[in-house]
Amino acid sequence: MSEFYIGLMSGTSIDGIDAGLVDFHDNKPRLIGFDYLPFPNEIKSVIQQLSEPDSKVSLKDYGAMDNQLGHLFAETVNTLLTKFSIPASSIKAIGSHGQTIYHAPDIEFPFSLQIGDPNIIAEKTGITTIADFRRRDIAAYGQGAPLVPGFHEAIFRDPHEHRCIVNIGGIANITVLPATQSAKVIGFDTGPGNTLMDQWIQKHQRVGYDKDGAWSRTGKINHDLVALLKQDAYFQAAPPKSTGKEYFSLPWVYHKIATDDYPAEDIQASLCFLTAITICDAIRNYAPATERILICGGGIHNSYLLQLIEQNTASPVTSTEQYGIHPDHVEAAAFAWLARQTLNNLPGNIKEVTGAVRPVVLGGIYQGNTKKGE
Ligand SMILES: Nc1ncnc2c1ncn2[C@@H]1O[C@H](COP(=O)(O)OP(=O)(O)O)[C@@H](O)[C@H]1O
Ligand SMILES: [Mg+2]
């Protein structure tokens, strides 16, 4: 029998909301519907301001954005249901990641804050909604991130091939899936994915991202600059580790290199190389047995980035699409999976990944009000 869940994801790139409809029939997740709602520019800009480490946005504006995003998430779900002619009552639950405003897993009193009020999602869709996934892992002394490896394991682990999944969103993360069943799954944030490239091109060309890496290709990679950036303690630190845009931002770049001394396109090419090389280094250091790299996340559309990754690793690089799920849909599907774990009272974290002291059932449950099976 069909068993439907919806996953909602809006990542650090602040590009928009991904909604995935997943059927867990026979315990095998299959994505059967997807919708995407790009953020209007005004919303994007408030979220960007809210996420700045020294944000001056008032608590009132913060609360209002939490509400507004709750409505937008709910609308995205309702549009998805209409598009695929599925009644709300047939959905078991929604897993909503929320919009990250701040991720600070390593301070004295660590926290990770996602907004987009789940009360509103549950109320407006009628569907039980699970949200606030990260804080229970942090309560168990974990990083609260990454949380997608459990889903990667469920869908991509193969007993005959050592695989490494690379998700290139604003931040990039890897999941190491050994073929040997007794070997532990590990995973961590490798550092910047698209975020530094996005921020740099936004500043210099007033566009949101470097389409197909076209601007990067016009520049020259400056290996001395990359070496300076790579000296950062984050890249040297052993996992478990996770990071966010509040760390990998343009001020981080300015602090390390005199950007004014170089052509802007050379900096863009170098930032692209930094993303590629830190992913490849992470695989070399923590997953040397890898036989296949599967890529997902928006970074896969940057063909220059992909080329640099391919040039710096010995393993074949493939899109997750060849393994059953479109690279733009993986994270949303992961949050559908996480919602199902929670509803079934099962852990969503992998303690070797987040560093938590134990596997924990993640998130808060906000009851819906549809009568199931109606
Ligand atoms: N055609 C493209 N060319 C280059 N980069 C792209 C393209 N399409 C998407 N991207 C990159 O992917 C990012 C969005 O990826 P996504 O996986 O949604 O990240 P997040 O999870 O952080 O929201 C964009 O900000 C952009 O940097
Ligand atoms: Mg996104």
Image (cartoon, grey):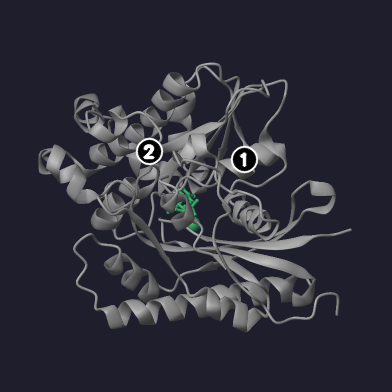
Q: Nearer the viewer, residue 235 or 319?
A: 235
Q: Determine whether, in the image, residue 275 is placed left or right of residue 265.
A: right
Q: Specify the quadrant of the image occupied by residue 157.
A: top right
Question: Residue 252: x percent and y percent?
Answer: 20, 45
Measured as percent of width and height from the top left, residue 44 is found at: 38, 69
Q: Residues within 10 Å of mark 1 (few under 14, many from 20)?
A: many
Can see residue 303? Answer: no
Q: Answer yes or no: do the residues labelled 1 and 2 have beta carbons within 8 Å?
A: no
Residue for point 42% across, 27% down: 282
Q: Determine which residue is flagged by label 2.
A: 241
Q: Residue sitting at 64 percent across and 66 percent down?
A: 94
Q: Residues within 10 Å of mark 2 (few under 14, many from 20)?
A: many
Of 87 and 142, nearer the camera is 142
| Closer to the eye: label 1 or 2 | 2
Label 2 sits on what residue type?
Lys
Which residue type carries mark 1? Answer: His
The Cα atoms of the two marked residues, 1 and 2, are separated by: 18 Å
Q: Is residue 37 above or below residue 266?
A: below
| Depth order, front residue of 14/51 | 51
The residue wearing badge 1 is 152
> For numbered disc 2, what is the local secondary structure?
loop
Please identify the quadrant where the C terminus is shown: bottom right
Residue 4 percent location from the top left of the image? 76, 62
Give percent across and percent down for residue 130.
Answer: 59, 66
Q: Is residue 58 left or right of residue 117?
A: left
